[in-house]
Amino acid sequence: MNFAPALIQALRSARHIAVLTGAGVSAESGLPTFRDVQTGLWSQFRPEDLATPEAFQRNPKLVWDWYAWRRSLVERAQPNPGHLMLAEMERRVPQFTLITQNVDGLHQLAGSRNVIELHGNIRRYKCFDCQAPYALDDADWEAPPRCPHCGGLIRPDVVWFGESLPTQAYWAALEAAQGCDVFFSIGTSGRVEPAASLPRVARRARATVVTINPDVETHSESHSYAIHGKAGEVLPALVRAAWG
């Protein structure tokens, strides 16, 4: 796999690399993307009809069971070469920020340390009413438990449709996009705001912007590169080309 010499030089000289990842990265670990066709019982539902506060208030058991099924998929998944190479890249530069729209925690399992989770984490839980964190145990799988603090229902600690991103996470992501030398957008459709605006923020700040996605055509412009391919194939080759 051949890369533009200017891109390789930009990586080698970078003091701060920021990366935005989306569902395409986790899809290489066998996890269906959020809008993939559901299977079995869940084929009759649209994810958009289940991942909302209103859906949880209307039928908490249904939403709870759907997330239990999704979490069972996550717990069987393992980091793929894309995850592992991002962790390796973090070890190669003075500052590295990984911003993810994924909720599966696979970046952390792969060894990434500085991870900003824009959409939360399906492995964590919190109270629907008072937002207090909740440690789930095996006895809680059948139905949403109650919060020991206020009695509210426990829900997954993820961002649902109609909810705002965690303020601290979003501002940290924005700061990284504004302050990095190289910005990667990997495995994301670029249609979900406000995360979709981060590559534009980095470009306005004169960072080198690299898009890696099977759905883009390969091309290079001044300080902008689009690479057609999967993260698990492109990133190992790119890390070898830049750092050996």
Image (cartoon, helix red, strand yellow):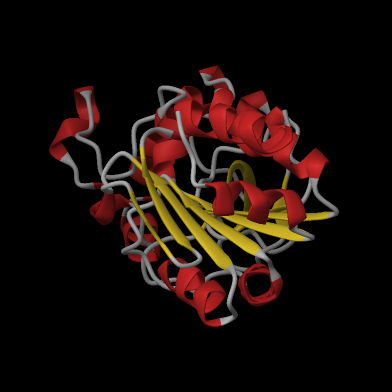
Q: Quadrant of the N terminus?
A: top left
Question: Which percent across, then down, holds residue 147?
Answer: 67, 54
Q: Name the residue at the right extreme.
A: 94
Residue sitting at 51 percent across and 66 percent down?
223
Q: Give how far across and how far down residue 92 sits, in percent.
A: 80, 41
Q: Position of residue 186 (x, y in %)?
A: 46, 47
Q: Is residue 112 left or right of residue 52?
A: right
Q: Nearer the viewer, residue 153 or 36?
A: 36
Q: Can residue 45 be seen in this snapshot?
A: yes
Decide if residue 147 is in sight here: no
Compared to residue 203, the image places residue 69 above or below, namely above
Q: Nearer the viewer, residue 106 or 176?
A: 176
Quadrant assignment, res 238: top right
Q: Residue at x 23, y 32 (%)?
A: 38
Q: Is residue 62 left or right of residue 106?
A: left
Give the vertical position of 170 relative to 98 (above or below).
below
Q: Quadrant of the C terminus?
A: top right
Q: Position of residue 234 (x, y in %)?
A: 48, 32
Residue at the image position 56 percent from the left and 61 percent from the top: 128
Q: How many marks?
A: 0
Residue in the image at 68% along x and 66% along y: 181
Q: Is residue 123 left or right of residue 71?
A: right
